[in-house]
Image: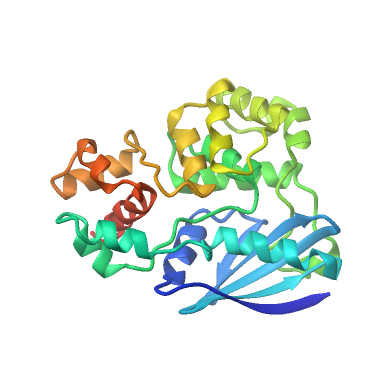
Amino acid sequence: MSDATHLRTSAPFDGAALLRFLAARAIPGVEVVADGAYSRTVALPSGPAVLTVTPDASGVTLHARLADAADQPKAIALVRHLFGLDQDPAPAIATLGEDPALAPLIAQRPGLRVPGTVSGFELSLRAVLGQQISVAAARTLAGRITAQLGAALPPELASGGALTHLLPTPAAIAAAPADVFPMPRSRIRTIQGLAAADPRLDAPADADALTELWGVGAWTAGYVRMRLGDPDVFLPTDVAILKALRNLGLTEADAPRWAPVRSFATLHLWASLANA
């Protein structure tokens, strides 16, 4: 079945920035951004689904192709989290807008939201794949792994389009032979260890346990924590963040004054590189 629902959020809301963020990381076969909309496959309780999300100034419109109408509330919850629709931008605007260095960034893009996720495991997998390589390279790796291990969409959902697979399950990744993964063996060990553990990642605090896994450090755990919804995460070793700080004449020592909304500061610093 298919349904369409408008999901509102508080102003200001920069849906275009979220589309750019998601487009840069879109996994081939699983996600696509085209014509002002983000579409993706997702496994819901009743079966595979395709969600298409079109942002506007007041929120997003969700078109959901579902196996069962009972999955509609779950689909809505995932989209609200992914697009940060339940985040309140006012505290970040107030706190960061008073900072001499960040105020111009806030004025330029007051509606930035911290992107969420549709799955804690998917988020942690992306973070591990992205360790020490570019966003584009991580996206390519995820696409290759998905083509090998992801379940194919039913024909009625695929419809000959760009969306062809579901992201692989933790069980499929954990059980796969090493030659499926086009990467160093140390990274394969980390990915398969993550998949075998399949940690519960529902709330921001859950991300802290990731550092107990082999090959997972503070950056990965912090990034996952931020996108799970913690508004006050800063990534002091992130190469792009360090570059953005230098551009503004700042260092990581300046970050404490941006509490308790350092996750939003992180997004604005990343965005400042695109501005440059």
Residue in the foreground of this view, choosing between 244 and 33: 244
* Residue 115 image point, x, y percent: 49, 56
- Direction from residue 34 to residue 118 in the image, left or right: right
Q: Quadrant of residue 61?
A: bottom right
Residue drawn 70% across the image and 62% down it: 163
Total labels drawn:
0
* Image coordinates for residue 114, horizontal then vertical, percent: 45, 56
- Image location of residue 55, percent across then percent down: 52, 75
Q: Is residue 143 above or below residue 174?
A: below
Residue 7 vertical placement versus 176 (above, below): below
**Residue at the spot x=47%, y=45% of the render?**
226
Q: Is residue 182 shown to the viewer in this render?
A: yes
Which residue is drawn at the image coordinates 20% and 61% (left, top)?
103
- Left or right: where 176 falls relative to 56: right
Q: As drawn, is 144 to the left or to the right of 233?
A: right
- The C terminus: image quadrant: bottom left
Q: Nearer the viewer, residue 91 or 150?
A: 91
Tell me the residue at 80%/54% (across/down): 152
- The N terminus sits in image quarter: bottom right
Front in this rendered view, residue 120 or 246: 120
Would you identify the image quadrant in which residue 4 lies?
Answer: bottom right
Residue 162 appears in the picture as rendered: no
Residue 85, given in percent of the width and then of the height, sits at 53, 66
How is colour applied across the structure in the image?
A: rainbow
